[in-house]
Amino acid sequence: MTKEYTIETGNRKTSVNGDIPNLFRRFNSETNRGNYELYCREFSYCTIFGNLRTRNTHTILKLLDIKRLPNLMFLIQIDDHRDAYSPYPALSFYSYKSSIVQALQARLKKHKIESVVSRFLGYCTIGAYLYIEGKSIKDDETRLRILALASDLSDYVLEKTGDSISIGISDFCDSHAQFPRAYSECKTALSFVFYGGRRSIILFDSGKQAPGMTRHDLTRIYFTNFITLIDKCDTPSYVAVAADMVNRFRKAEISPLTVKLLITRMFGRITDFFTDAGVDPDSLAYISQESFVELLECGFIDELSGIVARFCDKIGKLHSSSRQSPDERFRRHVNDCIERHSSDCMFGLSSIASLSNYSPSYFSRLFTRTYGMPFSRYLAIYRIERAKRLMLNESMTLHEVSRKAGFCSTSYFCSVFRKVTGKSPRQYASEAQVDDDGAAAQRLELIPVITTT
């Protein structure tokens, strides 16, 4: 006896006679009910991996509530997926994509285009399988019609969800067996979003590679330029030269991965050069690692010049500090330690001496000679200046201010505050409130470095 199944597709129920295809593995045989979203995803995976069974086509069409198998693929990338997920790596990405999938489904339905829209396993792409009249995307009329549809989908998603999407478009498929090829074409097209920027729409045959920038160009021209500019700490020129290099990449339109590898190689050579010049290798390695991560996560070519300029600027500052006098390097180190650790109430002379690899007595003498005052007084003034800044926040209690400024108790904070300023914290705060904004900002400005004449 043939069993009848009831399939839910949105608000509709469709009856299907016969066995459910094995490829739709999670059909609930006990309730005789399926899940439309699951079927779309299963269809997507089976087509791009080329294992959709022809004998099941009729049943699959009923499950997906379409009359004809798709003949064209859109691979849709969420442009800002890196920003959306980076703070929440442990959270599911499905809820984020659902609104985009629903917007695409609604718009295609309004255009009366039979389609299957599926969330992919990866968090940044969505597959749309469409049936569109036509045989070749090289036909001008068909090409313009498909580009207009893609542009309309992009506009609609932006309007309804606020999300920017880019779309890679395949060639027509004569049968479902050609969808693995279509998926590869879409992925290649999307890789050139790197050059096109957000909301790009790229056809499978648009990524024609021109003669690329060679390793010779980078290592001979730009490598030498950046070394010279880093030695001079010429920040404006970093930006100009980086922009010129990126423009050459843009004209060449070689593979985005190749671009990133070439710049990574250049970063490595610059790092090696300044290591040989005596710059601290651990600090150089840290800067390089940060820059490599930025390069890997870079989604658009417009971001490259900023990454290159920041890398050169960091190396330049590190190189410049390595040429400072011993007193200048000591001041830089002390100010950095205080800025990082002053909010810890246990931080004091012993702590900073340990961080400096000196004994407390030697560090104390060196500090007094360099700054003209004992370390304990310098730290107390620094913390009080920080407390003044925090007291601008009316919602913070005196206890919270003292704790964030680095004092272990409120009473000790009040004592030090009166000793440094000649007023109690409450008196100082009440006077600050009646000042005009400009005067208050000037009085309460946090000074990171206290200098002596």
Image (tube, rainbow, N blue to C red):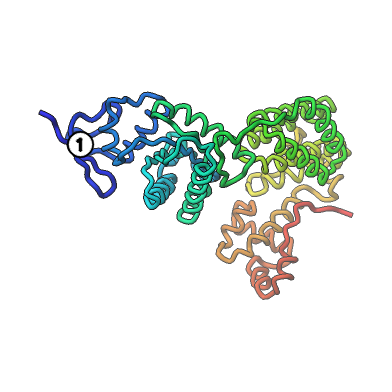
Residue 309 placed where, x, y %? 75, 41
Q: Residue furthest bottom?
A: 434
- Tally of marks: 1
Is 424 situated above or below 31?
below
**Direction from residue 132 to residue 237 in the image, left or right:** right
**Residue appearing at x 83%, y 27% in the figure:** 220
Residue 382 appears left or right of 161: right
* Observer-nearest of 148 and 396: 148
Residue 87 position in % (x across, y down): 52, 44
Say which element carries label 1: strand
Please name the amino acid that badge 1 sits on: Val
Residue 255, image quadrant: top right
Could you say which is closer to the camera, residue 121 or residue 277? Answer: 121
Res 121 seen here: yes
At x 55% / y 38%, what residue is drawn? 203
Spot the residue most to the left.
Answer: 1
Residue hosting label 1: 16
Evaluate whether residue 87 shows in this view: no
